[in-house]
């Protein structure tokens, strides 16, 4: 390979105008290929960089590894027949899945096509509203002068002003026929309405008084003078463009998570490790990976286990306070249930023990037993920190792990909280009590 130039120009599957620049060497990341835009869009691109290689560098590393290890291969053992049988059916299964995946891709494409059409229409309409508002500024000033001129004629009329001030129906029809756009029509209609409604507009109330119309005209002239050199413009608000893009992205991802949710995912065989869990299987981690925010590297690290560190609020907060981007798993036995459930939640904010709610735009609670994800709707109540509590989510609480009292679920700040409750005694409203049998908390 030495001296051989390697050129790879593969379009990025996410940013189709960019080409793949790097590959990730992290065995736990869900994204393997990165274009420049992919790298820049990461929350912590600096932390990502050490795990990235160019494709030529990857080939160099891989070829050196193969050369070093090929002589250590031991041959001679026969492959068990059941393994060969399992492989034998792969073609048919892959073909069936391929057809199913193509159908699902069509459905997803249809959803996004509809979203794009609606979003483009909505953005275009909003843009036109802002442009119209700017046009309205010019119209308003122009109409100030038109209105002022008309009031002058009404206050100091001459013989030639009469046809202008009191047109016939034929005159009105002629004027209407010369109108070519909405702005002109708006001025025409407004002019007629003001004449017909002078008293309602406060003009006619002074007409019977000596000098009343002159007073009104004088007031208009003063207001018109104030408009000299005024230049309306859209000033930069408190939100920068980058902040707007970030908030739109966060909100959009949250809405998509509530609109589309991958069920029955096929996990990555390499990334199916159980990360030291006593509660979760590989498929549970794979499901959590599909639910986790896409901008995070999914590499769960166990920081707290109740059965190991102590099933108490003190133990939980000692291990978890200050930690962000955590996934909590609770093995819970609901009152009236015949078996335990695996429920929990993701929180992007940091846990605390100061009796404060934790704001979150991306948090969600879930049940791995029912494969249900519930996203936050009241962002100020994403999580809650309290000395005697474990990982607690929502105001009220949607998932309250009360380690110094009675734990419960109470639908409030998350969409569909009732769906994570597995109890024959639960009627769909109010609190559903459970006993936390064990807890695991991971940072991502």
Image (tube, helix red, strand yellow):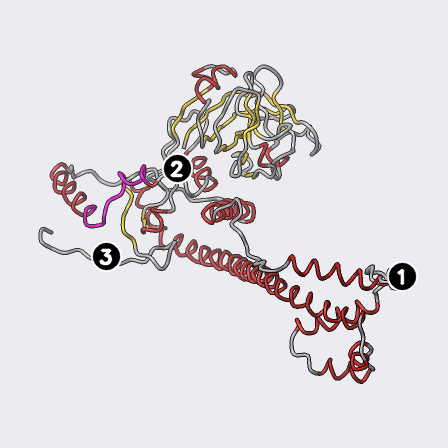
N-terminal of the two: label 1 or label 3?
3
Report the front residue among 305 and 51: 51
Tell whether position 178 is magenta. no
For disc 1, the marked residue is 209
At x 60%, y 31%, the residue is: 394
* Above or below: residue 119 compared with residue 272: below
N-terminal of the two: label 1 or label 2?
1
Could you give the CA–CA distance between mark 1 and mark 3, rounded to whole angstroms?
87 Å
Q: Position of residue 214 (x, y in %)?
A: 80, 63
Report the front residue among 160 and 62: 160
Most prominent secondary structure in the magenta stretch? helix
Drawn side of residue 111 relative to residue 51, left or right = right
> Residue farthest to the right?
208
At x 50%, y 16%, the residue is: 311
Drawn side of residue 6 relative to residue 91, left or right = left
Give the tally of numbered discs. 3
Task: Describe the element under mark 1 as helix, strand or loop.
Answer: loop
At x 69%, y 34%, the residue is: 428
For disc 3, the marked residue is 8
Closer to the eye: label 1 or 2:
1
For disc 2, the marked residue is 298
* Above or below: residue 365 compared with residue 216: above
Q: Are marks 2 and 3 in contact (CB under 8 Å)?
A: no
Drawn side of residue 70 relative to residue 316, left or right = left
Could you give the CA–CA distance between mark 1 and mark 2, rounded to whole angstroms?
80 Å
Q: Is residue 263 visible?
A: no
Report the front residue among 390 and 381: 381
Q: Which residues are magenta?
A: 46-58
């Amino acid at each position: 390979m030495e001296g051989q130039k390697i050129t790879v120009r593969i379009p990025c599957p996410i940013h189709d105008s960019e080409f793949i620049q790097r590959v990730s060497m992290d065995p736990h990341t869900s994204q393997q290929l990165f274009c420049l835009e992919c790298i820049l869009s990461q929350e912590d691109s600096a932390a990502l960089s050490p795990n990235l290689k160019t494709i030529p560098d990857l080939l160099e590393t891989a070829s050196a590894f193969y050369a070093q290890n090929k002589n250590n291969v031991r041959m001679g053992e026969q492959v068990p027949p059941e393994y060969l049988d399992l492989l034998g059916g792969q073609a048919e299964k892959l073909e069936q899945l391929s057809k199913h995946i193509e159908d699902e891709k069509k459905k997803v494409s249809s959803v996004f096509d509809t979203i794009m059409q609606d979003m483009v229409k909505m953005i275009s309409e909003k843009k036109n509203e802002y442009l119209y508002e700017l046009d309205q500024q010019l119209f308003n000033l122009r109409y100030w002068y038109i209105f002022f001129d008309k009031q002058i004629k009404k206050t100091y009329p001459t013989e030639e002003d009469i046809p202008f001030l009191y047109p016939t129906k034929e005159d009105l029809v002629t004027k209407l026929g010369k109108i070519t756009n909405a702005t002109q029509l708006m001025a025409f209609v407004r002019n007629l309405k003001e004449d017909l409604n002078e008293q309602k507009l406060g003009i006619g109330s002074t007409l019977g008084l000596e000098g009343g119309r002159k007073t009104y005209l004088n007031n208009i002239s003063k207001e018109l003078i104030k408009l000299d050199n005024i230049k309306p413009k859209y000033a930069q608000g408190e939100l920068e463009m980058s902040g707007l893009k970030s908030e739109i992205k966060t909100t959009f991802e949250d809405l998509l998570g509530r609109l589309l949710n991958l069920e029955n995912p096929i996990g990555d065989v390499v990334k199916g490790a159980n990360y030291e869990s006593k509660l979760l299987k590989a498929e549970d981690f794979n499901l959590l990976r599909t639910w986790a925010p896409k901008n995070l590297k999914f590499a769960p690290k166990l920081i707290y286990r109740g059965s190991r560190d102590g099933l108490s609020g003190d133990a939980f907060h000692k291990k978890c306070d200050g930690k962000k981007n955590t996934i909590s798993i609770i093995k819970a036995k609901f009152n009236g249930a015949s078996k335990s459930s695996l429920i929990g939640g993701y929180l992007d904010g940091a846990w605390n023990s100061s009796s404060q709610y934790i704001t979150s735009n991306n948090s969600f609670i879930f049940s791995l037993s029912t494969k249900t994800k519930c996203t936050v709707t009241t962002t100020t109540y994403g999580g809650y920190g309290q000395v005697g509590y474990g990982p607690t989510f929502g105001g009220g609480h949607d998932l309250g792990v009360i380690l110094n009292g009675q734990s419960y679920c109470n639908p409030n700040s998350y969409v569909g909280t009732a769906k994570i409750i597995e109890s024959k005694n639960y009627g769909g409203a109010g609190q559903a009590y459970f006993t936390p049998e064990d807890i695991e908390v991971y940072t991502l």
